[in-house]
């Protein structure tokens, strides 16, 4: 089983996703500052994994704190939360995780400091375990939507590497294969950061699931040739109306899917739904360094001085989403109502 991240006595241990697929190396972060760096530099990435990493980063801040009073401990935790909250803006799981750790602190703040620290460490580990269980449940629900055989396309990496384990979109594919469905995965390479070719292909090959990598601009032709029976992707943030922010290029895939009459599914935990965000236009989109576009493996691919855009995510309007698969079941349009019903009308607010 792939260990994307885990709490150890030495600190938070991550598989270094910047080194995959050619090197399987691990880094251990001993401080919350190091965890923040790991999130910012994509050592760990993928919305649910970022959320659990954030929680473990705050747990590290608690563990390392020299605070002698609860007030001092709170100040240390707030500073850590602030730093971690500034790493990546789009994945709402990051803010959800910070909020959950703050709420845990408030519930246990009357206890002795050593006990509060322990409680926060345990809360982050609980979030890790809950994420895996949610993905397995999503897999069980989503597998019923997969064809019994044939091609399934995915974009970016929404697998074990993007979560605490098992994956959201790849969890659905894994569960379908475990049930005996004969799927062949088409993995978009996902320029510019190549999460599809580097990470999705790596983890599916480890599991022996037949996989073909295609460059992003091949997806339309594959659909037109009848080679894709379904599409399943993850999400970084789902607005209250069902608009979905996910890796740049997802929107293109969704529009193509509609044209070809192919179902387009989004698999994501309830923690990815942002009820405070009415629609996709309000989702903050991370802009990343131009280098990711100008260079491939260190080689310059664009003329000096040319203008570059590098939005890390796009928004797929709800009208292109056939269904959203969550740990509590499958929802369909109108999402405004169905998502709220599913989540028990829980409100989320950014920190
Ligand atoms: O920039 P990344 O690699 O963090 O983007 C990841 C994605 O867009 C995933 O599809 C999304 O986070 C869902 S992961 C289960």
Image: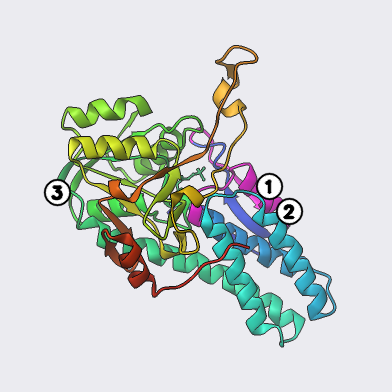
Q: Which mark is residue 202?
A: none
Placement of the C terminus among the 4 image quadrants:
bottom right
The correct choice, above or below, for 149 with respect to 252 in the image is below
Q: Is residue 201 left or right of residue 32?
A: left
In x, y percent, where is residue 19?
56, 36
Question: Which element carries disc 3, helix, strand or loop?
Answer: loop
- Looking at the image, can residue 30 be seen? no
Residue at 60% across / 68% down in the picture? 99
On screen, residue 89 versus residue 180, left or right, reads right
Point out the stretch of residues depicted in magenta.
21-48
Residue that sits furthest to the top in the current view:
303
Residue bearing mark 2:
33
Q: Quadrant of residue 156?
A: top left
Above or below — where is 20 with respect to 97? above
Looking at the rendered image, the quarter that the N terminus falls into is bottom left
Tell me what residue is drawn at x 67 percent, y 59 percent: 11
Look at the numbered disc 3 and say if its residue's Cβ is closer than 8 Å to ligand 1: no
- Is 265 magenta? The answer is no
Q: Residue furthest bottom?
A: 110
Q: Residue at x 64, y 72 (%)?
A: 102
**Answer yes or no: do the residues labelled 2 and 3 have beta carbons within 8 Å?**
no
How many neighbours does mark 1 have within 10 angstroms: few (below 14), some (14-19), or many (20 or more)? some
Q: Say which residue label 3 marks.
A: 148
Q: Earlier in the sequence, mark 3 or mark 1?
A: 1
**Mark 3 closeness class: few <14, some 14–19, many ≥20 residues within 10 Å:** some
Q: Which residue is mark 1?
A: 37
CA neighbours of label 2 inside 10 A, class few (<14), some (14 to 19), many (20+) = some
Q: In this picture, is 22 found above or below 26?
A: above
């Amino acid at each position: 089983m792939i260990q994307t991240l885990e709490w150890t006595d030495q600190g938070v241990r991550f598989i270094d996703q910047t080194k995959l697929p050619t090197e399987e190396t691990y880094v251990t972060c001993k401080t919350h500052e190091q965890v923040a760096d790991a999130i910012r530099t994509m050592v760990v990435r993928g919305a649910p994994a970022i959320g659990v990493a954030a929680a473990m980063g705050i747990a590290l801040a608690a563990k390392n704190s020299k605070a002698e009073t609860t007030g001092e401990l709170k100040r240390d935790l707030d500073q850590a939360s602030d730093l971690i909250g500034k790493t990546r803006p789009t994945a709402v799981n990051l803010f959800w995780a910070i909020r959950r750790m703050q709420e845990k602190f408030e519930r246990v703040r009357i206890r002795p400091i050593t006990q509060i620290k322990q409680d926060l460490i345990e809360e982050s580990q609980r979030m890790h375990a809950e994420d895996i269980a949610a993905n397995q449940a999503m897999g069980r629900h989503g597998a019923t939507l997969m064809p019994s055989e044939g091609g399934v396309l995915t974009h970016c990496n929404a697998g074990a590497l993007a979560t605490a384990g098992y994956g959201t979109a790849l969890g659905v594919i894994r569960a379908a294969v475990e049930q005996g469905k004969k799927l062949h995965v088409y993995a978009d390479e996902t320029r510019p950061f190549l999460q599809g070719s580097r990470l999705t292909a790596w983890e599916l090959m480890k599991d022996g699931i037949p996989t073909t990598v295609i460059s992003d601009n091949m997806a339309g032709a594959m659909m037109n040739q009848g080679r894709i029976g379904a599409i399943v992707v993850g999400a970084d943030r789902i607005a209250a109306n069902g608009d979905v922010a996910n890796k740049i290029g997802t929107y293109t895939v969704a529009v193509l899917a509609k044209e070809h009459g192919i179902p387009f599914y989004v698999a994501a935990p309830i923690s990815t739904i942002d009820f405070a965000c009415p629609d996709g236009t309000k989702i903050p989109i991370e802009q990343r360094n131009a280098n990711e576009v100008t260079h491939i493996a260190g080689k310059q691919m664009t003329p000096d001085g040319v203008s570059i855009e590098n939005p890390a995510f796009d928004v797929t309007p709800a009208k292109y989403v056939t269904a959203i698969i969550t740990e509590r079941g499958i929802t369909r349009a109108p999402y405004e109502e169905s998502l709220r019903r599913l989540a028990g009308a829980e409100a989320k607010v950014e920190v």
